[in-house]
Amino acid sequence: MTSSRQQYIERYAEYAMEQMRRYGIPASITLAQGIIESADGRSPLANSANNHFGVKGTYNGNYVLADDDKPNEKFKKYDNVGQSYEDHSKVLMAQRYQQYVRKLSHDDYKGWAAGIKKGGYASDSNYVSTLVDVIEGAKLQRFDKMVIQQMNAEGKQFGVQSNPLSNNKGTKAKATGMNLPQSSYSMPVQRREFMLITSPYGQREDPINKGKTQIHHGIDIKTNKDNVLATENNGVVVGVDHRTTTGGGKTVTVEYAREDGTKTRVQYMHLSEISVKKGDTVNAGQKLGVSGNTGTRTTGEHLHFGVINVSADNKLQWVNPAAYLAEISQKGNLNIEAQHNGKNILAEYMTAGTKAVNTDEQTPENWMSKLLGSEDAALGIEGGGDKGLLGNLMQMFMTLLMLTIQMENKSKEEKMQAVSDAVINRHIDISSFVPNLKSAVLSINDKGNAVLVVNDGKKEYSHELTNAEKNSISNILQSDSDDTTKRQRIGCIVNAITFSYQASNNYEQIEAQQQSQQQTIQRR
Protein backbone atom coordinates (compact mmCIF):
# COMPACT_ATOMS: atom_id res chain seq x y z
CA MET A 1 0.00 0.00 0.00
CA THR A 2 1.35 3.42 -0.95
CA SER A 3 2.08 6.08 1.65
CA SER A 4 -0.49 8.42 0.07
CA ARG A 5 -3.20 5.77 0.46
CA GLN A 6 -2.22 5.09 4.04
CA GLN A 7 -2.37 8.81 4.79
CA TYR A 8 -5.80 9.06 3.15
CA ILE A 9 -7.11 6.19 5.26
CA GLU A 10 -5.71 7.64 8.48
CA ARG A 11 -7.27 11.01 7.73
CA TYR A 12 -10.71 10.00 6.46
CA ALA A 13 -11.55 6.62 8.03
CA GLU A 14 -13.53 8.36 10.77
CA TYR A 15 -15.53 10.27 8.14
CA ALA A 16 -16.59 6.97 6.55
CA MET A 17 -17.40 5.48 9.95
CA GLU A 18 -19.62 8.47 10.75
CA GLN A 19 -21.56 7.91 7.54
CA MET A 20 -22.01 4.23 8.39
CA ARG A 21 -23.52 5.16 11.75
CA ARG A 22 -25.87 7.66 10.12
CA TYR A 23 -26.89 5.84 6.94
CA GLY A 24 -25.91 2.18 7.38
CA ILE A 25 -23.53 2.26 4.40
CA PRO A 26 -20.45 0.11 5.12
CA ALA A 27 -17.51 2.37 6.00
CA SER A 28 -15.32 0.16 3.82
CA ILE A 29 -17.44 0.95 0.74
CA THR A 30 -17.46 4.71 1.35
CA LEU A 31 -13.73 4.87 2.09
CA ALA A 32 -12.79 2.69 -0.91
CA GLN A 33 -14.91 4.82 -3.24
CA GLY A 34 -13.26 7.95 -1.87
CA ILE A 35 -9.83 6.40 -2.44
CA ILE A 36 -10.61 5.42 -6.03
CA GLU A 37 -12.47 8.54 -7.13
CA SER A 38 -10.18 11.08 -5.46
CA ALA A 39 -6.94 9.26 -6.36
CA ASP A 40 -6.04 9.00 -2.67
CA GLY A 41 -7.13 12.62 -2.16
CA ARG A 42 -4.83 13.97 -4.88
CA SER A 43 -7.31 14.52 -7.72
CA PRO A 44 -7.95 18.06 -9.03
CA LEU A 45 -11.57 17.89 -7.84
CA ALA A 46 -10.51 16.83 -4.33
CA ASN A 47 -7.99 19.64 -4.11
CA SER A 48 -10.01 22.43 -5.68
CA ALA A 49 -13.52 21.56 -4.54
CA ASN A 50 -13.22 19.09 -1.60
CA ASN A 51 -15.15 16.75 -3.93
CA HIS A 52 -13.89 13.23 -3.19
CA PHE A 53 -16.56 11.29 -5.11
CA GLY A 54 -16.83 13.13 -8.41
CA VAL A 55 -20.42 14.22 -7.72
CA LYS A 56 -21.80 16.47 -10.46
CA GLY A 57 -24.05 19.49 -10.02
CA THR A 58 -23.93 22.38 -7.55
CA TYR A 59 -23.78 22.48 -3.75
CA ASN A 60 -25.44 25.51 -2.19
CA GLY A 61 -24.91 27.14 -5.58
CA ASN A 62 -21.17 26.38 -5.63
CA TYR A 63 -19.42 24.40 -8.33
CA VAL A 64 -16.26 24.04 -10.38
CA LEU A 65 -15.96 23.25 -14.08
CA ALA A 66 -14.12 20.15 -15.28
CA ASP A 67 -14.08 17.98 -18.38
CA ASP A 68 -15.77 14.58 -18.05
CA ASP A 69 -18.26 13.07 -20.50
CA LYS A 70 -18.54 16.59 -21.87
CA PRO A 71 -16.25 19.61 -21.61
CA ASN A 72 -16.82 22.11 -18.79
CA GLU A 73 -19.29 20.08 -16.75
CA LYS A 74 -20.34 21.33 -13.33
CA PHE A 75 -19.05 19.44 -10.28
CA LYS A 76 -20.16 20.22 -6.73
CA LYS A 77 -17.82 22.38 -4.67
CA TYR A 78 -17.93 21.77 -0.90
CA ASP A 79 -16.74 23.93 1.98
CA ASN A 80 -15.01 20.91 3.50
CA VAL A 81 -14.48 17.19 2.97
CA GLY A 82 -17.08 16.29 5.59
CA GLN A 83 -19.79 17.79 3.36
CA SER A 84 -18.53 15.69 0.45
CA TYR A 85 -18.84 12.47 2.48
CA GLU A 86 -22.30 13.41 3.74
CA ASP A 87 -23.53 14.29 0.24
CA HIS A 88 -22.15 11.03 -1.16
CA SER A 89 -24.15 9.07 1.43
CA LYS A 90 -27.31 10.83 0.33
CA VAL A 91 -26.55 9.80 -3.25
CA LEU A 92 -26.34 6.12 -2.23
CA MET A 93 -29.62 6.37 -0.31
CA ALA A 94 -31.49 6.78 -3.61
CA GLN A 95 -33.98 4.03 -4.50
CA ARG A 96 -31.94 2.97 -7.55
CA TYR A 97 -29.23 1.67 -5.18
CA GLN A 98 -31.28 0.84 -2.08
CA GLN A 99 -33.42 -1.68 -3.94
CA TYR A 100 -30.32 -3.88 -4.20
CA VAL A 101 -28.66 -3.27 -0.82
CA ARG A 102 -31.26 -2.47 1.84
CA LYS A 103 -31.53 -6.10 2.98
CA LEU A 104 -27.78 -6.68 3.12
CA SER A 105 -25.87 -6.81 6.40
CA HIS A 106 -23.79 -3.77 7.29
CA ASP A 107 -20.50 -5.62 6.86
CA ASP A 108 -21.34 -7.29 3.53
CA TYR A 109 -19.04 -5.07 1.48
CA LYS A 110 -19.01 -7.49 -1.46
CA GLY A 111 -22.79 -7.47 -1.65
CA TRP A 112 -22.83 -3.67 -1.40
CA ALA A 113 -20.23 -3.33 -4.15
CA ALA A 114 -22.33 -5.53 -6.46
CA GLY A 115 -25.57 -3.75 -5.46
CA ILE A 116 -24.47 -0.21 -6.22
CA LYS A 117 -22.98 -1.44 -9.51
CA LYS A 118 -26.39 -2.87 -10.42
CA GLY A 119 -27.93 0.48 -9.54
CA GLY A 120 -25.75 2.12 -12.17
CA TYR A 121 -23.13 3.78 -9.96
CA ALA A 122 -20.30 3.06 -12.40
CA SER A 123 -20.10 1.91 -16.02
CA ASP A 124 -16.76 0.12 -15.64
CA SER A 125 -17.38 -3.63 -15.94
CA ASN A 126 -14.59 -4.30 -13.44
CA TYR A 127 -15.86 -1.82 -10.85
CA VAL A 128 -16.96 -4.44 -8.31
CA SER A 129 -13.64 -6.28 -8.33
CA THR A 130 -11.74 -2.97 -8.24
CA LEU A 131 -13.72 -1.83 -5.21
CA VAL A 132 -13.30 -5.16 -3.39
CA ASP A 133 -9.58 -5.26 -4.17
CA VAL A 134 -9.09 -1.82 -2.61
CA ILE A 135 -11.07 -2.83 0.48
CA GLU A 136 -9.25 -6.11 1.03
CA GLY A 137 -5.85 -4.74 0.04
CA ALA A 138 -6.05 -2.06 2.75
CA LYS A 139 -8.18 -4.17 5.16
CA LEU A 140 -10.86 -1.48 5.19
CA GLN A 141 -13.45 -4.00 6.39
CA ARG A 142 -11.96 -3.58 9.88
CA PHE A 143 -13.71 -0.22 10.11
CA ASP A 144 -17.08 -1.90 9.48
CA LYS A 145 -16.45 -4.24 12.40
CA MET A 146 -15.43 -1.34 14.66
CA VAL A 147 -18.64 0.58 13.95
CA ILE A 148 -20.82 -2.50 14.40
CA GLN A 149 -19.14 -3.25 17.72
CA GLN A 150 -19.59 0.34 18.89
CA MET A 151 -23.22 0.59 17.81
CA ASN A 152 -24.11 -2.72 19.47
CA ALA A 153 -22.38 -1.67 22.68
CA GLU A 154 -24.30 1.62 22.75
CA GLY A 155 -27.60 0.02 21.72
CA LYS A 156 -27.97 2.28 18.67
CA GLN A 157 -29.54 1.54 15.30
CA PHE A 158 -27.96 2.05 11.90
CA GLY A 159 -29.51 4.32 9.34
CA VAL A 160 -30.61 6.95 11.87
CA GLN A 161 -29.43 10.20 10.34
CA SER A 162 -29.49 11.95 13.71
CA ASN A 163 -26.67 9.71 14.94
CA PRO A 164 -23.93 12.14 15.99
CA LEU A 165 -21.38 13.33 13.52
CA SER A 166 -17.96 13.95 15.04
CA ASN A 167 -16.87 16.64 12.56
CA ASN A 168 -13.37 15.17 13.00
CA LYS A 169 -11.16 17.42 10.87
CA GLY A 170 -14.15 18.06 8.66
CA THR A 171 -14.61 21.78 9.12
CA LYS A 172 -12.59 24.93 9.51
CA ALA A 173 -13.03 27.25 12.46
CA LYS A 174 -14.98 29.72 10.34
CA ALA A 175 -17.61 27.06 9.63
CA THR A 176 -17.90 25.02 12.82
CA GLY A 177 -21.57 25.86 13.15
CA MET A 178 -21.05 26.93 16.76
CA ASN A 179 -21.73 30.61 16.03
CA LEU A 180 -19.50 31.89 18.81
CA PRO A 181 -20.18 35.52 19.73
CA GLN A 182 -17.45 38.16 19.84
CA SER A 183 -16.64 38.29 23.55
CA SER A 184 -14.06 37.18 26.09
CA TYR A 185 -12.56 33.70 25.88
CA SER A 186 -10.19 31.44 27.78
CA MET A 187 -8.42 28.15 27.20
CA PRO A 188 -9.54 25.37 29.58
CA VAL A 189 -6.19 25.52 31.43
CA GLN A 190 -3.77 28.41 31.69
CA ARG A 191 -0.54 28.19 29.68
CA ARG A 192 1.89 30.80 28.37
CA GLU A 193 2.56 29.24 24.95
CA PHE A 194 0.90 25.87 24.41
CA MET A 195 -1.09 23.09 26.02
CA LEU A 196 0.50 19.64 25.73
CA ILE A 197 -2.02 17.20 24.23
CA THR A 198 -1.31 13.63 25.32
CA SER A 199 -4.13 12.09 23.26
CA PRO A 200 -5.98 13.87 20.41
CA TYR A 201 -9.54 13.40 19.16
CA GLY A 202 -10.48 10.40 17.02
CA GLN A 203 -9.53 6.76 16.68
CA ARG A 204 -6.87 5.45 19.07
CA GLU A 205 -5.77 2.36 20.93
CA ASP A 206 -7.85 1.89 24.05
CA PRO A 207 -5.47 2.89 26.91
CA ILE A 208 -7.29 0.57 29.31
CA ASN A 209 -7.81 -2.44 27.01
CA LYS A 210 -4.57 -2.64 25.05
CA GLY A 211 -4.89 -4.08 21.55
CA LYS A 212 -8.42 -2.74 21.10
CA THR A 213 -9.37 0.51 19.40
CA GLN A 214 -11.87 3.16 20.43
CA ILE A 215 -13.15 6.54 19.28
CA HIS A 216 -11.82 9.20 21.63
CA HIS A 217 -14.53 11.88 21.82
CA GLY A 218 -12.31 14.59 23.23
CA ILE A 219 -8.70 15.60 23.77
CA ASP A 220 -6.50 14.85 26.79
CA ILE A 221 -4.50 17.80 28.13
CA LYS A 222 -1.47 17.27 30.39
CA THR A 223 -2.14 18.84 33.77
CA ASN A 224 -0.96 18.77 37.36
CA LYS A 225 -3.66 19.97 39.74
CA ASP A 226 -4.42 22.90 37.42
CA ASN A 227 -7.47 25.12 37.77
CA VAL A 228 -9.83 24.20 34.92
CA LEU A 229 -11.50 27.24 33.42
CA ALA A 230 -14.74 28.20 31.68
CA THR A 231 -13.99 29.00 28.04
CA GLU A 232 -16.66 31.65 27.34
CA ASN A 233 -18.90 34.19 29.04
CA ASN A 234 -22.49 33.46 30.06
CA GLY A 235 -22.12 29.70 30.37
CA VAL A 236 -24.58 27.66 32.41
CA VAL A 237 -23.39 24.66 34.43
CA VAL A 238 -25.79 21.93 33.28
CA GLY A 239 -24.03 18.94 34.81
CA VAL A 240 -22.00 18.22 37.94
CA ASP A 241 -20.98 14.64 38.80
CA HIS A 242 -19.00 14.09 42.00
CA ARG A 243 -18.78 10.32 41.55
CA THR A 244 -15.36 8.71 41.11
CA THR A 245 -16.71 5.29 40.09
CA THR A 246 -17.70 6.36 36.55
CA GLY A 247 -15.38 6.23 33.54
CA GLY A 248 -14.93 10.00 33.51
CA GLY A 249 -14.75 10.48 37.27
CA LYS A 250 -15.66 13.87 38.68
CA THR A 251 -17.12 15.85 35.77
CA VAL A 252 -18.41 19.34 35.06
CA THR A 253 -20.50 20.19 31.98
CA VAL A 254 -21.07 23.79 30.85
CA GLU A 255 -23.46 24.88 28.09
CA TYR A 256 -23.30 28.06 25.99
CA ALA A 257 -26.44 29.24 24.18
CA ARG A 258 -26.27 30.66 20.62
CA GLU A 259 -28.53 33.19 18.95
CA ASP A 260 -29.81 30.64 16.42
CA GLY A 261 -31.15 28.34 19.15
CA THR A 262 -28.22 25.93 19.12
CA LYS A 263 -25.90 25.30 22.06
CA THR A 264 -22.30 24.28 22.62
CA ARG A 265 -21.78 21.84 25.48
CA VAL A 266 -18.30 21.58 27.02
CA GLN A 267 -17.20 18.72 29.30
CA TYR A 268 -14.33 18.55 31.83
CA MET A 269 -13.54 15.04 33.12
CA HIS A 270 -11.27 13.31 35.69
CA LEU A 271 -11.31 16.31 38.06
CA SER A 272 -10.01 16.12 41.62
CA GLU A 273 -12.20 18.98 42.85
CA ILE A 274 -15.38 20.72 41.65
CA SER A 275 -15.93 24.40 42.48
CA VAL A 276 -19.37 25.02 40.93
CA LYS A 277 -22.87 23.62 41.23
CA LYS A 278 -25.55 22.85 38.69
CA GLY A 279 -27.38 26.00 37.57
CA ASP A 280 -24.45 28.38 38.15
CA THR A 281 -23.64 30.99 35.48
CA VAL A 282 -19.92 31.19 34.66
CA ASN A 283 -17.70 33.49 32.60
CA ALA A 284 -14.50 33.00 30.62
CA GLY A 285 -11.53 32.22 32.85
CA GLN A 286 -13.69 31.38 35.87
CA LYS A 287 -12.51 28.39 37.92
CA LEU A 288 -14.76 25.34 37.57
CA GLY A 289 -12.60 22.92 39.54
CA VAL A 290 -9.17 21.33 39.69
CA SER A 291 -7.78 18.72 37.29
CA GLY A 292 -7.06 15.26 38.62
CA ASN A 293 -7.03 11.52 38.04
CA THR A 294 -10.50 10.33 39.08
CA GLY A 295 -12.63 7.76 37.28
CA THR A 296 -12.30 4.14 36.19
CA ARG A 297 -11.01 5.00 32.71
CA THR A 298 -7.98 7.15 33.43
CA THR A 299 -4.31 6.29 33.15
CA GLY A 300 -2.87 9.25 35.03
CA GLU A 301 -3.29 12.94 35.75
CA HIS A 302 -4.86 14.81 32.80
CA LEU A 303 -7.91 16.80 31.75
CA HIS A 304 -10.28 15.15 29.27
CA PHE A 305 -11.90 18.04 27.39
CA GLY A 306 -14.90 17.31 25.16
CA VAL A 307 -17.23 19.43 23.01
CA ILE A 308 -20.74 18.64 21.77
CA ASN A 309 -22.95 20.71 19.48
CA VAL A 310 -26.64 20.67 20.45
CA SER A 311 -29.02 21.53 17.61
CA ALA A 312 -32.16 23.60 18.07
CA ASP A 313 -34.17 20.34 18.23
CA ASN A 314 -31.75 18.87 20.82
CA LYS A 315 -29.80 16.55 18.53
CA LEU A 316 -26.25 15.96 19.74
CA GLN A 317 -23.15 16.06 17.57
CA TRP A 318 -19.60 15.41 18.79
CA VAL A 319 -17.09 18.04 17.67
CA ASN A 320 -13.33 17.84 17.54
CA PRO A 321 -12.34 20.17 20.42
CA ALA A 322 -9.45 21.40 18.26
CA ALA A 323 -11.98 23.16 15.99
CA TYR A 324 -13.68 24.77 18.98
CA LEU A 325 -10.42 25.85 20.62
CA ALA A 326 -9.12 27.21 17.31
CA GLU A 327 -12.13 29.48 17.06
CA ILE A 328 -11.73 30.56 20.69
CA SER A 329 -8.04 31.24 20.12
CA GLN A 330 -8.80 33.40 17.09
CA LYS A 331 -11.76 35.35 18.45
CA GLY A 332 -10.12 35.88 21.82
CA ASN A 333 -6.68 36.58 20.31
CA LEU A 334 -5.25 34.07 22.79
CA ASN A 335 -2.31 32.84 20.67
CA ILE A 336 -2.17 29.56 22.58
CA GLU A 337 -1.36 26.38 20.68
CA ALA A 338 -2.34 22.78 21.43
CA GLN A 339 0.74 20.69 20.68
CA HIS A 340 0.68 16.94 20.07
CA ASN A 341 4.01 15.36 19.08
CA GLY A 342 5.28 18.62 17.65
CA LYS A 343 2.09 19.50 15.76
CA ASN A 344 -0.27 22.33 16.63
CA ILE A 345 -3.59 20.52 16.24
CA LEU A 346 -5.42 23.86 16.08
CA ALA A 347 -3.55 24.96 12.94
CA GLU A 348 -5.70 23.14 10.39
CA TYR A 349 -8.83 24.79 11.78
CA MET A 350 -7.48 28.33 11.58
CA THR A 351 -9.06 30.60 8.98
CA ALA A 352 -7.03 32.07 6.14
CA GLY A 353 -4.49 34.67 7.18
CA THR A 354 -4.14 33.36 10.73
CA LYS A 355 -0.61 32.61 11.84
CA ALA A 356 -0.10 28.89 12.29
CA VAL A 357 3.01 26.85 12.95
CA ASN A 358 4.40 24.89 10.00
CA THR A 359 4.39 21.55 11.77
CA ASP A 360 5.96 19.71 8.83
CA GLU A 361 9.31 21.28 9.71
CA GLN A 362 9.32 20.00 13.28
CA THR A 363 12.02 17.47 14.13
CA PRO A 364 12.49 15.32 17.24
CA GLU A 365 15.36 17.59 18.25
CA ASN A 366 13.48 20.89 18.10
CA TRP A 367 10.36 19.28 19.56
CA MET A 368 12.56 18.24 22.48
CA SER A 369 13.84 21.80 22.84
CA LYS A 370 10.29 23.17 22.75
CA LEU A 371 9.23 20.80 25.51
CA LEU A 372 12.31 21.57 27.61
CA GLY A 373 11.31 25.23 27.76
CA SER A 374 7.64 24.56 28.48
CA GLU A 375 5.67 24.70 31.70
CA ASP A 376 4.61 21.08 31.25
CA ALA A 377 8.21 19.85 31.49
CA ALA A 378 8.22 20.65 35.23
CA LEU A 379 4.73 19.41 36.07
CA GLY A 380 4.76 16.86 38.85
CA ILE A 381 8.15 17.98 40.22
CA GLU A 382 8.07 19.30 43.77
CA GLY A 383 8.92 22.99 43.61
CA GLY A 384 8.51 23.11 39.83
CA GLY A 385 12.18 22.95 38.92
CA ASP A 386 14.41 25.40 37.10
CA LYS A 387 13.44 26.23 33.49
CA GLY A 388 11.69 23.09 32.48
CA LEU A 389 12.48 19.88 34.28
CA LEU A 390 15.39 20.99 36.48
CA GLY A 391 17.50 22.53 33.75
CA ASN A 392 20.75 20.61 33.29
CA LEU A 393 19.30 17.34 34.54
CA MET A 394 16.51 17.40 31.98
CA GLN A 395 18.98 18.39 29.28
CA MET A 396 21.04 15.30 30.14
CA PHE A 397 17.88 13.21 30.26
CA MET A 398 16.62 14.29 26.85
CA THR A 399 20.05 14.13 25.18
CA LEU A 400 20.25 10.57 26.44
CA LEU A 401 16.81 9.95 24.92
CA MET A 402 17.99 11.15 21.50
CA LEU A 403 20.96 8.78 21.76
CA THR A 404 18.62 5.85 22.38
CA ILE A 405 16.15 6.56 19.58
CA GLN A 406 18.85 7.29 17.00
CA MET A 407 20.06 3.71 17.20
CA GLU A 408 16.56 2.33 16.66
CA ASN A 409 14.84 2.02 13.31
CA LYS A 410 11.98 4.38 14.12
CA SER A 411 9.96 6.66 11.87
CA LYS A 412 9.89 10.40 12.51
CA GLU A 413 6.43 10.10 14.03
CA GLU A 414 7.60 7.37 16.40
CA LYS A 415 10.57 9.47 17.47
CA MET A 416 8.31 12.46 18.11
CA GLN A 417 6.08 10.22 20.23
CA ALA A 418 9.13 8.91 22.12
CA VAL A 419 10.13 12.47 23.01
CA SER A 420 6.59 13.23 24.23
CA ASP A 421 6.46 10.02 26.27
CA ALA A 422 9.80 10.83 27.91
CA VAL A 423 8.47 14.19 29.12
CA ILE A 424 5.07 12.88 30.16
CA ASN A 425 6.33 9.72 31.91
CA ARG A 426 9.85 10.98 32.73
CA HIS A 427 11.63 7.70 32.00
CA ILE A 428 13.91 6.29 29.29
CA ASP A 429 14.55 2.64 28.50
CA ILE A 430 18.34 2.30 28.07
CA SER A 431 18.36 -1.51 28.06
CA SER A 432 20.03 -1.47 24.65
CA PHE A 433 23.14 0.05 26.27
CA VAL A 434 23.54 -2.96 28.57
CA PRO A 435 22.63 -6.17 26.67
CA ASN A 436 23.97 -8.28 29.57
CA LEU A 437 21.14 -7.03 31.80
CA LYS A 438 17.45 -7.88 31.53
CA SER A 439 16.43 -4.21 31.64
CA ALA A 440 17.64 -0.75 32.57
CA VAL A 441 15.47 2.37 32.92
CA LEU A 442 16.51 5.89 33.87
CA SER A 443 13.76 8.10 35.29
CA ILE A 444 13.26 11.36 37.15
CA ASN A 445 11.14 11.10 40.28
CA ASP A 446 8.74 13.63 41.77
CA LYS A 447 11.55 15.19 43.79
CA GLY A 448 13.57 15.86 40.64
CA ASN A 449 16.17 13.15 41.25
CA ALA A 450 17.56 10.85 38.56
CA VAL A 451 16.89 7.20 39.43
CA LEU A 452 18.34 4.16 37.67
CA VAL A 453 16.38 0.90 37.93
CA VAL A 454 18.12 -2.22 36.61
CA ASN A 455 17.13 -5.88 36.52
CA ASP A 456 19.86 -8.50 36.14
CA GLY A 457 17.38 -11.33 35.65
CA LYS A 458 17.46 -12.31 39.30
CA LYS A 459 16.80 -9.12 41.18
CA GLU A 460 15.83 -5.51 40.56
CA TYR A 461 18.00 -2.71 41.93
CA SER A 462 17.05 0.98 42.31
CA HIS A 463 19.80 3.59 42.55
CA GLU A 464 19.61 7.37 42.81
CA LEU A 465 22.42 8.80 40.70
CA THR A 466 25.05 10.81 42.55
CA ASN A 467 26.19 14.20 41.27
CA ALA A 468 29.44 12.59 40.15
CA GLU A 469 27.57 9.94 38.15
CA LYS A 470 25.28 12.53 36.55
CA ASN A 471 28.30 14.66 35.63
CA SER A 472 30.05 11.64 34.11
CA ILE A 473 27.03 10.83 31.94
CA SER A 474 26.64 14.49 30.92
CA ASN A 475 30.33 14.71 29.96
CA ILE A 476 30.04 11.58 27.83
CA LEU A 477 26.97 12.93 26.05
CA GLN A 478 28.69 16.26 25.35
CA SER A 479 31.96 14.70 24.18
CA ASP A 480 33.15 14.40 20.58
CA SER A 481 32.95 10.60 20.68
CA ASP A 482 30.76 8.79 18.17
CA ASP A 483 27.36 7.50 19.27
CA THR A 484 28.50 3.90 19.59
CA THR A 485 31.32 4.89 21.96
CA LYS A 486 28.93 7.05 24.00
CA ARG A 487 26.53 4.13 24.44
CA GLN A 488 29.35 1.80 25.47
CA ARG A 489 30.75 4.25 28.03
CA ILE A 490 27.33 4.94 29.54
CA GLY A 491 26.73 1.18 29.57
CA CYS A 492 29.95 0.78 31.59
CA ILE A 493 28.65 3.23 34.21
CA VAL A 494 25.35 1.33 34.45
CA ASN A 495 27.18 -2.00 34.75
CA ALA A 496 29.49 -0.61 37.44
CA ILE A 497 26.51 0.59 39.48
CA THR A 498 24.79 -2.77 39.01
CA PHE A 499 27.91 -4.70 39.98
CA SER A 500 28.26 -2.76 43.24
CA TYR A 501 24.68 -3.67 44.17
CA GLN A 502 25.20 -7.30 43.16
CA ALA A 503 28.36 -7.48 45.26
CA SER A 504 26.60 -5.88 48.22
CA ASN A 505 23.67 -8.25 47.81
CA ASN A 506 25.99 -11.27 47.62
CA TYR A 507 27.83 -10.09 50.74
CA GLU A 508 24.56 -9.70 52.60
CA GLN A 509 23.50 -13.18 51.52
CA ILE A 510 26.82 -14.71 52.68
CA GLU A 511 26.65 -12.83 55.97
CA ALA A 512 23.05 -13.98 56.51
CA GLN A 513 24.05 -17.58 55.78
CA GLN A 514 26.95 -17.35 58.26
CA GLN A 515 24.70 -15.89 60.95
CA SER A 516 22.15 -18.64 60.34
CA GLN A 517 24.84 -21.33 60.61
CA GLN A 518 26.20 -19.76 63.81
CA GLN A 519 22.74 -19.67 65.37
CA THR A 520 22.27 -23.34 64.46
CA ILE A 521 25.57 -24.26 66.14
CA GLN A 522 24.64 -22.31 69.27
CA ARG A 523 21.29 -24.09 69.54
CA ARG A 524 23.09 -27.39 69.44
Image (cartoon, rainbow, N blue to C red):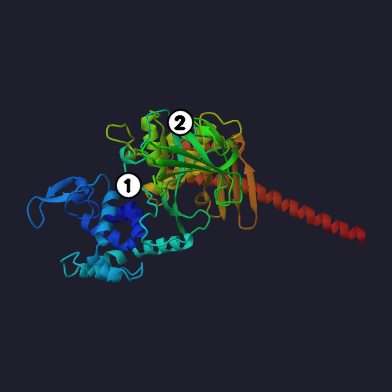
Relative image position of residue 424 (x, y in whole percent):
51, 42
Image-based side of 451 in relation to 398, left or right: right
Q: Quadrant of the C terminus?
A: bottom right
Viewer-side residue, 497 vs 169? 169
Viewer-side residue, 256 vs 418? 256
N-terminal label among 2 and 1: 1
Q: Quadrant of the N terminus?
A: bottom left
Q: Label 1 amino acid?
A: Gly
Relative image position of residue 89 (x, y in whole percent):
28, 58
136 versus 312 height, above or below: below
Secondary structure beneath dot 2 equals loop
Image-based side of 513 in relation to 208, left or right: right
Image-based side of 467 in relation to 331, left or right: right
Relative image position of residue 119 (x, y in whole percent):
21, 68
- Residue for badge 2: 233
Residue ID at (13%, 50%): 74
In the image, which disc is placed on residue 63?
Answer: none
Does the rendering let one see residue 479?
Answer: no
Quadrant of res 446: top right
Measured Cα–Cα span from mark 2 to mark 1: 26 Å
Q: Nearer the viewer, mark 2 or mark 1?
A: 2
- Residue for badge 1: 170
Relative image position of residue 289 (x, y in whole percent):
57, 36
Secondary structure beneath dot 1 equals loop
Residue ID at (47%, 41%): 266
Q: Are marks 2 and 1 in contact (CB under 8 Å)?
A: no
Q: How many residues crowd around disc 2 within 10 Å: few (fewer than 14), some, or many (20 or more)?
A: some
Q: How many residues crowd around disc 1 within 10 Å: few (fewer than 14), some, or many (20 or more)?
A: many
Quadrant of res 137: bottom left
Viewer-side residue, 234 vs 12? 234
Viewer-side residue, 254 vs 250? 254
> Number of marks in the image?
2
